[in-house]
């Protein structure tokens, strides 16, 4: 099970790096024209939302999650 988790983390980290590169490209030049062709990059807000989601998912996998089970004994006072 740990191997699958590590593979998932590796995949998520690689994907996050790609989103960082996309964010940088957008910040450097959102739209440009070469001859008669123009290219507009993705929306910055969309890329930043994806980065946040990936960071949260990586943090959750690395931390093992925050869900814990506690046992308690109900008492009638």
Image (tube, rainbow, N blue to C red):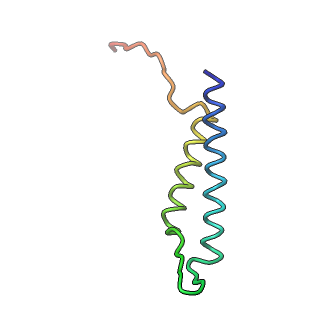
Q: Residue at x 61, y 65 (%)?
A: 23
Depicted 1 relative to depicted 47: above or below? above
Q: Quadrant of the N terminus?
A: top right
Which image quadrant: the C terminus? top left
Query: Residue at point 53% right, 86% down?
Result: 36
Name the spot of residue 37 as percent of width and height, x first: 53, 81
x and y, in percent, of residue 14 in the image: 66, 47
Residue 69 or 24: which is nearer the viewer? 24
36 vs 44: above or below: below
Name which quarter of the figure residue 33 lies in: bottom right
Position of 48 with respect to 3 (left or right) is: left
Q: Residue furthest bottom?
A: 35
Counting from the top left corner in percent of width and height, residue 4 is at 61, 27
Q: What is the count of numbered marks?
A: 0
| Whole-percent x, y for residue 3 in the image | 66, 25
Q: Which residue is more in the foreground, 32 or 14?
A: 32
The single residue placed furthest to the front in the displayed view is 36
Which residue is rendered at x = 53% and y = 33% of the image?
66
């Amino acid at each position: 099970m740990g191997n699958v988790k590590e593979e998932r983390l590796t995949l998520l980290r690689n994907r996050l790096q790609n989103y960082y590169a996309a964010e940088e490209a957008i910040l450097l030049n959102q739209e440009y024209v070469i001859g008669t062709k123009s290219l507009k990059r993705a929306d910055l807000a969309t890329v930043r939302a994806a980065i946040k989601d990936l960071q949260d998912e990586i943090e959750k996998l690395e931390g093992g999650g925050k869900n814990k089970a506690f046992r308690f004994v109900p008492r009638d006072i």
